[in-house]
Amino acid sequence: MINLLMQRFSLFILMLMAIPAFAQNPDMPADFLTKEFHKERRAKLREQLPANSVAVFFANPVRNRSSDVDYVYHQDPDFFYLTGYKEPDAVLFIFKDKQTAANKTQYDEIIFVQPRSAQAEMWTGRRLGDAGVKNQLGFEQAFNNKEFKKYNVDFSKFDKILFFDFLNDVRDDPRDSSDLYSMIEDFKVKVKYPSQEKGLSVTREPEKNNLNTTELVTIMEGLRGFKTKEEVDMIKKAVSISCMGQREVMKAIKPGMSEREIQGIHEFVFKKYQAEDLGYPSIVGAGHNGCILHYIDNYKPNITNKELILMDLGAEFHGYTADITRTIPVSGKFSPEQKQIYELVLKAQEEGMKVCKPGATFQDLTAATRVVINRGLKDLGIIKNENERHLYYPHGCCHHIGLDVHDRGPYDKLQEGMVITIEPGIYIPDNANCDKRWWGIAVRIEDDYLITKEGYEHLSIAAPRKVEDIEALMKQPSALDDFVLPDLNTKN
């Protein structure tokens, strides 16, 4: 009986191995970035590489959550940008010049990926394998990562080997001699990476100091900071989904809801529109919780009709994220004090928008918003003069978005093709050194913009920003009005 079961299991495994990865798979969306996009990005990188060099990129490691449960895997954005590959345990080489393989074929890029495994795929999902990477991602030179140890290139011949330095935060799977940890260790041997002992700094110089861990940052910022049409389309989809989440919450919110419930409505809308992930942990802070800039606990069980709620959330669609913040009154109507602070932040944002065009600097936008806020806080008696140092507006107003919520990109002058945020805010915590009537008011308004030839395109305009528009939308019925769950009986 045992032998028969083993035979059947072996047959099942062989049948799985025979199925091409993702072949005619109706479960997968058909609107991902194309292999031609990623190939063109590799070509653009190659153009920027210094003479006689090679750039090396490792996939993100798998992160353990607890025990035998890992976090949902998220690919390194640079690796995804250049390959479209979403799996762990991979390494990519992009050469400035053609290399000659042992069989005399020439190549200027090569990738090593995790192999097909029927047993692993039965537990954790389909893998592309080297054949799938060739067929679907367009690589001519793709191999299983088990082959990496045998990959022999004389790295001493390159003037520069460009890579991001290691943070020593990759776990070693003792069952897998070709996992990411092993490939990094093999790479260090191949390039004569300086050894380290007892956690101290470098103790031995490489035979040839051609290792460069700084230049690749600048190159990738120059590439990823300027979005192609395909990327803009992805960002617009993420922004539209995120705007819809804000709109639906404005209609659905009621006093007595919890911060987590509001978070759930946003994220349900994201999933309803097929956004795979969040661009960053959702921030939903009612009252004084909104004064915590990256508040992600979202635990408050009962929001009151006297509070504002600050909601900073972004859907991630096919790798690209939005970043939108709206602040609304839980009651549906701003109090006089809330309205004054809100309209001051809105005015600051609109001043930043006036400056937003090619040639302006990120500092110009921040300065424009800060002048408005400081003058307004002085007029309201919250600060004594416009030059007073304070923490009511403690951050800059702008950053790139794309594959990361704080995306790679040059932070000097705005240029056509950049996608950025403008996000001024005012945060007045309890016990602040001002009149008590302002305590607990936190307002941030954040929108996403594509820099155009003459100015900008406001991508997130669908989510209301003006007081009257917010209050009008909050009066509309919600599809969730009748969605009432029974009380839980946990005493039995």
Image: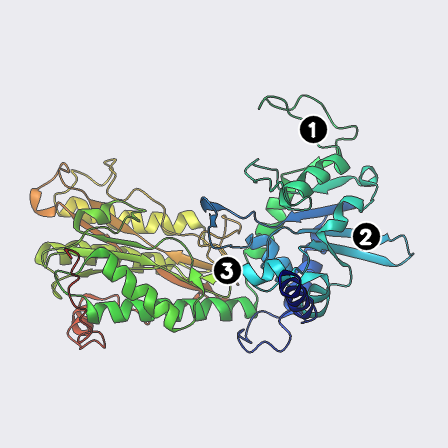
Which marked residue is nearer to the observer: mark 3 or mark 2?
A: 2
Judged left or right of residue 125, residue 442 is: left
Q: Residue at x 61, y 38 (%)?
A: 165
- Separation of residues labelled 1 and 2 (CA atoms): 26 Å
Vertical placement of residue 164 versus 133, above or below: above
User: Seen from this angle, which residue lies furthest front?
Assistant: 1
Q: How many marks?
A: 3
- Crowding at mark 3 (Cα within 10 Å: few <14, some 14-19, many 20+): many
Q: Earlier in the sequence, mark 3 or mark 2?
A: 2
Mark 3 belongs to which amino acid? Met
Give the residue number, with chain letter if any, for mark 2: 97
Which element carries disc 2, helix, strand or loop? strand
Mark 1 belongs to which amino acid? Pro
Q: Residue at x 68, y 57 (%)?
A: 115
Judged left or right of residue 128, residue 274 is: left
Give the residue number, with chain letter if any, for mark 1: 194
Q: Earlier in the sequence, mark 1 or mark 2?
A: 2
Q: Position of residue 64 (x, y in %)?
A: 48, 45
- Separation of residues labelled 3 and 2 (CA atoms): 30 Å
Q: Quadrant of residue 344?
A: bottom left
Mark 2 belongs to which amino acid? Asp
The N terminus sits in image quarter: bottom right
Give the residue number, with chain letter if any, for mark 3: 418
